[in-house]
Structure formats: C-alpha cells, structure tokens
Amino acid sequence: MTVLEQIRALAAQGIGRYGVEATIGRKMDADELQAFYKAETIRKLKIAQKKARGPKSVAERVREHVASANDVGPIDPRPRHRRLKESCRYDLERFMWYYCRRILNHRASKLVRDGLIHDVQETILHGGQAVKLYGRGTGKTTIIVHCAITWAVLYGHRRYPVIISATGKLAKKNLKTIKKLLSRTKAILQDFPAVAIPIQALGDVSQRAASQTYRGTPTDVEWSADQIVLPMVRDENGRPLDAGCGAIVGSVGIGGAVRGVNELGQRPDILVLDDPQDRKIAHSPTR
C-alpha cells in the first residue's frame, strides 16, 4: 500500500489530519493533503446521505430478510464425481444403476437383457417412436418414466418431456417419484448441484418456488403436482450453470390436452405413455 492509499484509507475511517500525520510519521505534502481532504469529504457525504434516508422501516427490514432467505446463491456447479457424471451422459443404464438405485429393484435386470433400456435411450437421443409391451410389476415404469426422464432432463437431451397415464392421478404419482429422485438423492445433489440445490432449498414446499432467487434473479422453478420446471441459474455471463437448468417435466391423463401446450416458450419434445389403459378402456371393444 502506497502512502497516498494509506492516507485515503485512514481518512475514510474518520481519522483526522494530525492523526494521519502521526501515523505516517511526518507532515503531509500538498498532494497528500489534497488526497486526505477528498477522502474526508466523501466520508462526510456518505454519512449525510445515510442520515437523509432515515432509519429503515420494519417492512423494509422484513423484505430484505425474506429476500436473503429465499436466495440460493452462490452455487459451485462443479460435480463431485466429474468422470462418473460424464460417463453417464450417453449411457442411461449406467446412470440408472448409480443415480437411481434407491427406486430400482431386481426386475430391472431382466429389462436390461431384453434391450428395453437401449431402445428407450436411442429414442430419447435420436427421436422416433417406440412401443414396448410389458406386464404390470416388471419395473417398466421405473425405468421408462422415472429413470429415463430424469436422465433426459438433467443432461439436456430433452427440454420438455410429458408423461401420459390412464388418469391424471397416475400421471401425478409418476411425477412425484421424479420429484423425490431430484430432491432426495445424494448423488444427484453432488453431481448436479445447479439443479438439485435450489430444489432441495424448497423443502417440498411448492409455495416457496415463486419467491426463490439466485443472486437476486428469480430461478423460475416450479414444483407443482402436475408439472416441474427445473431452476434456471446462470453465471455472471448469463449462461446456465448446467444443461438441465430450465427443463420442464409435465404430466397429464390420457384425456388431457397436449397439443398446443407452450410453457416458457417451450413445447413438449417427447411424450411418454405409461399404462394408458384403465379398466374401463381395457374392457371396451371399441376403445
């Protein structure tokens, strides 16, 4: 620190002229006196401005407290297991066994052997249509809906998948499982922090989503019963911190409207039908 910088710092702290000269061990010359009086004037102006504003009201203090409590920044977007995360980017099966273990069971191994996971992966990555028929209790919903959609949105392979089930209630149940994966899986929290940390901060209270911010900017996260919008968090250059930021997952019953849906400028880019038949449709000769 130069002598001039030291003089400015002392003046900004309210130290008088003689106190400054005692600190530097000599009298100040003309340039140093000019720097001292300038710094002292700035300090006095700041004090005057603060007094003119007056004390903060209770409402202002409450707003500042709420704003700070709802802000989730800053976030370090670097994954704890970088190589593992990258190895799963185009490998649904690997992602499933590591990041989705808490919801898998032994039946999943048979579906791997049957090629289901490979077919689902190719459809998500390259598009097209695929129809796979499996009986109840085989684990198909866990893989096709819960694991595959979570993988697709976290890596940015798909921006707006929609789950279609026999009823709206079943569709919401599937969405609820995906929400649990995103909010309660330690491995996802460690390797996808830009998405998982804001979600975890909600604490399963969807009302908190409307006021959540990242460094003062709304994350636009949605955590409702029939739709998820992953938080959008950006760096200082305006770039999303992770590929999954801002992705949407919707859910509707078989009779729900899908065509024409437009959310935050995005339209559904993949539809996943899971158990679209209920008992009434299954027994109908015309349906």
Image (cartoon, helix red, strand yellow):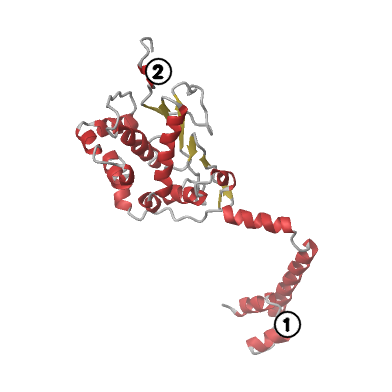
Pick the residue in front: 34 or 25. Answer: 25
Residue 87 in picture, x, y percent from top left: 28, 46
Identity of the residue drawn at 73% across and 82% down: 16
Question: Looking at the picture, does residue 81 appear above or below residue 256?
Answer: below
Residue sitting nearer the eye, 99 or 235: 99
Residue 2 visible in the picture: yes
The image quadrant that residue 12 belongs to is bottom right
User: On residue 199, which mark appears?
Assistant: none
Q: Secondary structure at mark 2?
A: helix
Vertical relation: 261 (above or below) 32: above
Q: Which residue is mark 1?
A: 16
Image quadrant where one finds the N terminus: bottom right
Q: Amino acid at mark 1?
A: Gly
Q: Which quadrant is home to the C terminus?
A: top left
Mark 2 to mark 1 CA distance (whole Å): 88 Å
Residue 135 as seen in the image, left or right of residue 211 = left
Q: Amino acid at mark 2?
A: Lys
